[in-house]
Image (tube, helix red, strand yellow):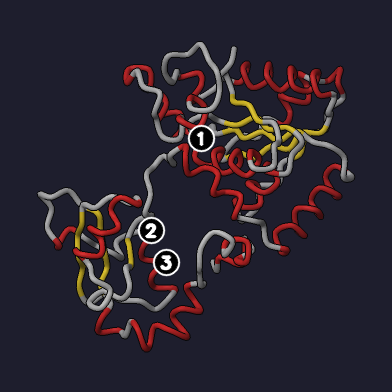
Amino acid sequence: MPYSEWFQIESLRGYHRVIEAQDFMEKLAPRVWPPEARIGFCWLPSDRSKSDCRMKDGNPFENFWSELNIDFVDTEIYQLNYDEYSIDQWNRRFPSKQYPVLALKGAPASFPMLAQHRYLQKYMTWSEKILEEIHEHQRKLFNNESYIGIHLRNDIDWERSCADVESYKTRSYMASPQCFDSMKTNHEYVTRKICYPPDEEVLRLVKNVVLRTRIRNIYVATDKRPMIKEIEEHLAAQKVIVKHLDPWLPIIDVAMLAHADFFIGNCVSSFTSAVKRARDVRGLPSIFWAFNE
């Protein structure tokens, strides 16, 4: 998917010079990066060899490079950091005359995202195409009225991922630093309830927010169970309206949640973290299931 399908590339240029991959391959690659010079780069521990750098192994790697008609004639491995203090090391190890293009297999950043990098979200502005679709959904679903967005991560794979989380006694499990770094809590580490909130916690917190905000419209994004009937029955007295799109592009769910008047997300989920970053740069309120009880 071209970047400009989802985000405005001009706003990204407010941070750095940038060109879309498709434009690069069409206009510049034949001259600066011909097929016989295409080398892939992998971060690997020092005890791993070049043969372990498989640039097109699996999804999304195979799909991404093949969509751009890119094959690699060789690979390089490195253990360098991605920070301003390592620029000289990069230049010495991979001089631009010999390596004009650094095609990295993975994102040049830490996972989960470091707190000091979250502000970069402000340079990612939704494309007009995405905004038009969001505004249409807001009109059809809620008549352009205020709505609460909730993210439920409740498929079996997530339940298994959260089953033993308390044994790790950590504040850093998948995307959980997004809550522990930015919000006050009495929790010492990620609990199973924070990771995989039970239905009663979902119903409790949704009702709490509805009563507090007096917003009756609820938008649900989920990978499995939207809990529409359960929420409607639990909040029958509040006469809530609960909607779930299940769009074929998950980015639509991200954008719908990002534009909600209030958001409840999953502390451990990277999907939630994308929503929260987009909301934080606009000053919109967000909380997490079972985090501040």
Residue pointed to by mark 2? 59
Give whichever of discs 1 and 3 has the lower sequence position. Answer: 3
- The residue lying at 28 percent from left, 73 percent from top is 96
Q: Which mark is residue 26?
A: none
- The residue lying at 70 percent from left, 46 percent from top is 256
* Residue 17 spot, x, y in % from top left: 50, 68
What is the crowding at mark 2: few (fewer than 14 residues within 10 Å), some, or many (at least 20)?
A: few
Q: Is residue 27 left or right of residue 199?
A: left
Q: Are marks 2 and 3 in contact (CB under 8 Å)?
A: no
User: Which is closer to the viewer, label 2 or label 3?
Assistant: 3
Distance in Å between CA atoms under marks 2 and 1: 20 Å
Residue pointed to by mark 3? 64
- The residue lying at 41 percent from left, 18 percent from top is 189
**Badge 1 amino acid:** Asp
User: Which is closer to the viewer, label 1 or label 3?
Assistant: 3
What is the crowding at mark 1: few (fewer than 14 residues within 10 Å), some, or many (at least 20)?
A: few
Distance in Å between CA atoms under marks 2 and 3: 8 Å
Residue pointed to by mark 1? 155
**Badge 3 amino acid:** Phe
Q: Are marks 1 and 3 in contact (CB under 8 Å)?
A: no
* Residue 192 spot, x, y in % from top left: 45, 19
Q: Quadrant of residue 104?
A: bottom left
Give whichever of discs 2 and 1 has the lower sequence position. Answer: 2
Give whichever of discs 2 and 3 has the lower sequence position. Answer: 2
What is the crowding at mark 3: few (fewer than 14 residues within 10 Å), some, or many (at least 20)?
A: few
Distance in Å between CA atoms under marks 1 and 3: 26 Å
* Residue 85 spot, x, y in % from top left: 30, 50
Secondary structure, mark 3, is helix
* Residue 293 spot, x, y in % from top left: 59, 12
